Image (cartoon, rainbow, N blue to C red):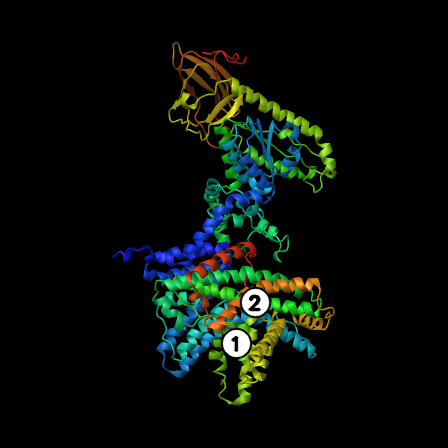
Amino acid sequence: MYFNSFQFFVFFALFLCGYFLSPRKGKSLLIFLGSLFFYACWDFRFVSLILFSTVVDYVVGLRLHACSDPHNRKRWVSLSLVVNLGLLGIFKYYNFFIDSAVELLTDLGFHATAPGSLTILLPVGISFYTFQTLSYTLDIYRKQLEPTRNFIDFGAFVTFFPQLVAGPIERAAHLLPQIQNPQRPTAAQLRNGTFLLAWGLFEKVVVADNLAFITDKGFAAPASGPNTLLSLYSFAFQVFADFDGYSNMARGMAAIMGFSLFHNFNAPYFAASPSEFWKRWHITLSSWLRDYLYIPLGGNRKGPIRTRLNLMLTMVLGGLWHGAAWTYVLWGTLHGLLLMLWPRKAHPRKWWTGILVRIVFFHLVCLSYLFFRAEDLPMVLELLHSFGQGWSPLVNSDLCTIAVKIFAFSTPVILYQALQYRSGQVDPARAWPLPLRVGFYVILFYAIVLWGVNDAQSFLYFQF
Amino acid sequence: MLSRFSISNFKLFHNAGFWALLIIVLIESLLQAPLRKRFHRHHVDRLVQKVDEHTFDAPVLILGDSIAENVFRRVVPLEDRFAVFASNQAIEMTGQSFILQRYLAHNPQPAIVVLMAGMPMYGDLEQIFTENYIQRVFIHWSEIAWMAQHTLDPVFISKCIAYKCSPTFRYRQQIRESLRPHKSTEAGPVTYTAPQVPKWSASYRLNQAWKTLRNKNASEKALETMLSLTAEAQIPFVYIPPPGTQQAQATFEQSMREMSRYQNTWPHLEIWEEERAVFPEDNFFDGTHFNDQGYRHIRPYQEALFLRILTTGQRIDQQTKDLRRLNMSDIKTRNGIHLPQPFLLANFYPIEGIRSHAFQWTQPEFELTVNGSGNLILETAAGSPPGILRILSGSPHQAFKLTGGKQILTIPLSSDHERLRFSFPPWKPDSNDNRTLGIAIEALGLAAAPAHANSPSE
């Protein structure tokens, strides 16, 4: 049940009716049940998995709070880590590690056979809810959070359907109190929620899904350097519009229900450095990795070399989080290298150098997408090889058509990012006057109806 | 105090979504007619437009799939006799039923309705074509309500309503193409795909459970609606199996099995099984639809078929004009036998060319009162048991022996108020005891009673 499907909108409308009509005490139960149904619409067999994870972290949270002995507390938090990361490892990484180990041993001259590949599906959203539940137990372990005694509230927090399958990755300290004490949405929340929902849908079905055709064609047959470059541009805006669209819709739906979720993107392609980029791109993941991986590893407190190593390790694991493939590891490594090597305190003094730096950095990000989008390493090599070909003649009609389409579809998201960047606000539309917002809605409606790709296409980040 | 109730204090008026919705509703209302007129549509769209906007006075209405369309589309010289609304299997029986309803609502009643369709029960409003050929096309509220009732699927119905309310959504493909032919998006023309619901999805399982519960699929329900409508309007309904290759024999047999189930309940349904024609494979370009060679070869078949349809339609049409129709309020029953208005089990079918009403009963005895004059014509169905019919009014009481099986009786009505009592052995379920009685009244002063009227036996 994708957010961009009719099925989902009907579900959400029915859910909202029930939610607003239900008594205050019943709201979290309704969220919990509604979310489980939402999840079951993908594959009801995996509902047991998410319930298991929920029960384990609920119990661990209570035990951690009740227990004062540091050894026992470590045992309980280890249990949570083993269960959550174990499930993630089995369902997401088992085949990857086994196959990679066999390949490595074979290359080293040993005779190795795989003990057997698991033909299992990747439960949708497992990476997201695993990180969310882990943050709950880790915060309690660090005594930064009080556990909830109400299982329904905790279940609603873990499975909260607007952000269950692709984030934003919430923290218990932020979302759980809202679930425990649900509020009626304010007029501002309704206004903002409606806007985010409409804008997110536009980003997904008009921008991302149309650019997907260009990207897919370009990556399927990398004909020349300019063609590959255009495909990378196309993918850069596709992946942004796709994920930002999802995040905006999630935030919009939550706002309509009276909740506030973290924002996930804030004009990332206007970043002038890797560290700024990661403060603007997939913010909830990068802050999770910072709080629960980078800082526990020592952060920047143990000298420059260790800091760089910590950065690299965090980014490699961040890459691996995105998928069980060496291409993602390389993508993370590349970003790790950028973080390590990018000159610190290199703030451009002149406006044109600022633009130049941003353009250069954007192209480095695009280059990293080559690893992110490629299906395997041979494809990466093929794409890299294509860069050296076909630059003359640079301009031909096919390339111009592709470039115009990329420009046409990406312009709305570039402009909106520019507004975000300039205003310093994540949701600059909040301040728009009424007639502007009305006109914007009408334009969005007709753009979605006329140019939206009508098959409900999966969101890219569902696979992670 | 005044300012508190001022319009400007009403929160909705400060809501951009509200104003945008209002503007969109206004634009969409204004666009309904122009978009409908301007944009070309696929053939089902055109067919529906033809039903809605033109008047036909043909005695024969043809419905059916693309093979029927192949067979009947070359009847231009006979246009005044045939109203051809055969289209495509994609519209399923549901679409055929909607076309029939629209036709009957706008046109003089035909003398005969012909349905030619292979696999008439195939489809349950979930084919890949359903959105483009049914949801997007049949957008009367009554049609949406019918589909809502039979699918109980809020997603399906929401889409129907969206197509109904937004002409921009309905004609988005045509608008795209008119804005920039074929190239306005990389996606190209709008594509319709059936939702890919995995078998482990809860919604898929719920849908399956609902299908099991509701017992019949939408096509079966739609056919029943068509049969009921034609019965009510006293129009014979003829099913003709489409021509095909020898390889399509299994399909033909299945169609026959499916349709024959309805014959017992709906006696006005005629199945012309003998009209099934088999042609060599090289007469078809895809094994199903005729090629040019096929069109040349099917001429004799077409001529014979058209003649039979026209003769049947013409005969009944003429008789309808000449003979008095039985007014259902003229018949009253007792002992728990009901002839509801319109009949649930009572349908129309011809006895010896005269229109009759028929009904089924299960009781061993029941009484019937007929208000009318002329000849009362009764027909018992093939599966009826032997019994006795007594005329209770007048003296002495006449009695007629019903021998069992198909039998036709013509009884002159001596008064305007005749009471008849039928006595039969008790009815047993799941037996071949198919008690169907056809009743017709032949008006006085017209043709004499058929020659095979029985004499009183007691």
Is residue B26 visible in the rendered image? The answer is: yes
- Say left or right for A140 vs B224: left
The x, y position of residue A131, in whole percent, is 48, 72
Which residue is the extreme one toward the bottom? A303
Give the amino acid type for the residue marked by disc 1 in the picture.
Trp
> In which chain is the residue bearing label 1?
A
- Say left or right for B177 vs B333: right
Q: Residues within 10 Å of mark 1 (few under 14, many from 20)?
A: many
Say which of A311 and B417 sits in front.
A311
Say which of A169 and B218 sits in front.
A169
Quarter placement of the N terminus of chain B: bottom left
Vertical placement of residue B290 versus A61, above or below: above
Vertical placement of residue A156 versus B220, above or below: below
- Say left or right for A45 vs B71: left
Say which of A453 and B92 sits in front.
A453
Give how far apart the Cα atoms at labels 2 and 1 are.
15 Å
Give the amino acid type for the residue marked by disc 2 in the picture.
Val
Q: Residue at x 46, y 78 (%)?
A: A78
For disc 1, the marked residue is A278
- Counting residues from the start of the chain, the first of labels 2 and 1 encountered is 2
Q: Which mark is residue A239?
A: 2
